[in-house]
Image (tube, rainbow, N blue to C red):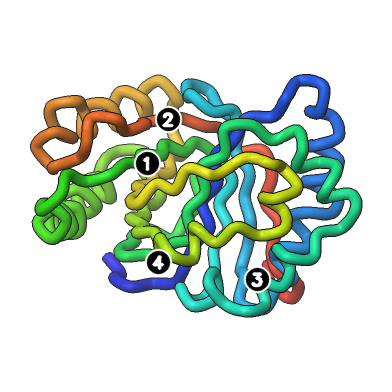
Amino acid sequence: MTQGAGGAVAIWHDIASEGLDEFYAWHGEEHMPERVAIPGFLRGRRFIATDARLGFFNLYETVSADVVSGPDYRRRLDNPTPRTISAVRHFRNVARSLCAVAAMTGTAQGGLVATLRYEVEAGHEARHRERMMGEIVPGLAVAPGVAAVKFLEADRTASGYVNAEQRARGAPNMVPPFVLIVEGWADEGSFLDLVRSILSVEACADLGISSDYALEFFRHQLTTVAPGRT
């Protein structure tokens, strides 16, 4: 397991049905290539819901946590293209966290992804981090069919910055303080059962996770990598 490895932008959202075709074209042709061209961005991946409250999950990975709160990314956010302004108006129910990677394990990418976005009960944060990094991440990492695990913690100040893209959308974002991402490469049913057993209601409560959490499942749609990377 690697600790303190990089940064990430984690985004969940719905898309209004009338804007879905526009979203797909913009996101694949312009938005993801634009994002991974920002210095320090490594790759972006989009996933579609298989069992989730929200329809899409997008994950951008960066060389460091400083990148997601840095001037190059903020400059891009505050100077959206006309196509971006049009497309983001179809976004609904956005949850977005600019994160440091607290711990990660695995070198593969899974076609199946489970995300747990949540808050921790007041006063339980330190113990929660210890248990996630000492028990949950290592335990999931050796489970059958698991390709990678990432434990993220949001920079709440950076995540709360209201940029021009958000203003064009005209609605606030939810900011999950903690995120756990589990990537799977095997049978979908077995993967869902595995994650749900390890992250059961009882297990989440025992970890100090507040009751209003979201454990959701997605399937890979698209990966875009930074120029010069494979």
Earlier-in-chain disc, 4 versus 3:
3
Disc 1 to disc 4: CB gap under 8 Å? no
Q: Earlier in the sequence, mark 1 or mark 2?
A: 1
Q: Say few, some or many: other residues with alpha carbon within 10 Å of mark 2 (under 14 / 14 to 19 / 20 or more).
A: many
Q: Nearer the viewer, mark 1 or mark 2?
A: 1
Q: Position of residue 161 (x, y in %)?
A: 55, 61
The residue pinned by badge 4 equals: 100
Say if mark 1 contacts mark 2, CB within 8 Å: yes
Percent x, y for residue 96?
A: 52, 49
For badge 1, the amino acid type reads: Arg
Residue type highlighted by circle 2: Glu
Q: What is the C-alpha distance between the residues marked 3 and 1?
A: 23 Å
The residue that disc 1 covers is 117
Q: Amino acid at mark 4?
A: Ala
In the displayed structure, does residue 68 sit left or right of residue 205?
right
What distance separates the C-alpha of mark 1 from that of mark 2? 9 Å
Residue at point 70%, 50% (across, down): 167
Dot 3 crowding, Cα within 10 Å, few <14, some 14–19, many 20+: some
Mark 2: secondary structure: strand
Which residue, given by chain and number where applicable, does mark 3 sit on?
73
Residue 99 in the image, given as x and y percentages of width and height: 43, 62
Q: Amino acid at mark 3?
A: Tyr
Picture coordinates of residue 116, whole percent (x, y): 35, 39
Q: Which residue is mark 2?
A: 216
Q: Residues within 10 Å of mark 1 (few under 14, many from 20)?
A: many
